[in-house]
Image (spheres, rainbow, N blue to C red):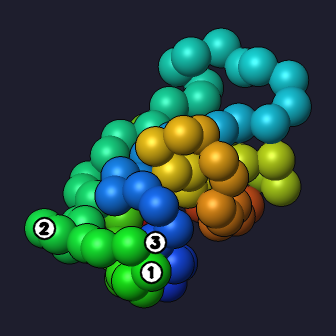
Amino acid sequence: MPGLKRRFGRTFLIVIALFVLGPRLHAARNAVTWNFVNLPATGRIGQTIQFAASVTNAGDVRWGGSYFLEVRDQDGAHLSYLPLEGVAPREI
């Protein structure tokens, strides 16, 4: 998964969450394994940072068009959605 550039506003924490938008499936069919999230050790207001994240589709169905990695700041403000559509089971 390619890195992502975003501006640091007034916060120092980026919250990363996997969101499945749409109907909920049984947990075994819809699972994720976090491989890594590499964030810089420090940051300051106004700084642009780069980071990388890797997840594996640990379920048994291909992720569809309603699967995203959401990037939020510490206040929960949306920064970006990264699409995960097309990731097959056991694929990174």
Identified at 56% across, 51% down, the residue is 72
Identified at 50% across, 31% down, the residue is 31
Identified at 42% across, 56% down, the residue is 11
Residue where numbered disc 2 is placed: 41
Q: Position of residue 6 (x, y in %)?
A: 52, 78
Left or right: residue 41 versus residue 45 is left
Density class for disc 1 (Cα within 10 Å; few <14, some 14-19, many ≥20) is few
Question: Compared with residue 60, is residue 4 higher up or lower down, i.e. above or below?
Answer: below
Whole-angstrom CA distance, mark 2 to mark 1, is 16 Å
Q: In terms of depth relative to the viewer, which is nearer, 77 or 20?
A: 77
Q: Are marks 1 and 3 in contact (CB under 8 Å)?
A: yes
Whole-angstrom CA distance, mark 3 to mark 2, is 14 Å
Left or right: residue 85 versus residue 74 is right
Residue where numbered disc 3 is placed: 8
Density class for disc 2 (Cα within 10 Å; few <14, some 14-19, many ≥20) is few
Q: Position of residue 59 (x, y in %)?
A: 52, 34
Q: Which quadrant holds residue 82?
A: bottom right
The answer to whether residue 57 is visible is: no
Q: Earlier in the sequence, mark 2 or mark 1?
A: 2
- Which dot, 2 or 1, sits closer to the camera? 1
Residue where numbered disc 1 is placed: 46
Q: Looking at the figure, which quarter contains the C terminus?
A: bottom left
Whole-angstrom CA distance, mark 1 to mark 3, is 5 Å
- Looking at the rendered structure, the kind of residue marked 3 is Phe
Q: Which quadrant holds residue 30?
A: top right
- Looking at the rendered structure, the kind of residue marked 1 is Gly
Direction left: furthest residue: 41
- Which dot, 3 or 2, sits closer to the camera? 3
Identified at 45% across, 80% down, the residue is 46
Question: Compared with residue 76, is residue 25 higher up or lower down, i.e. above or below?
Answer: above
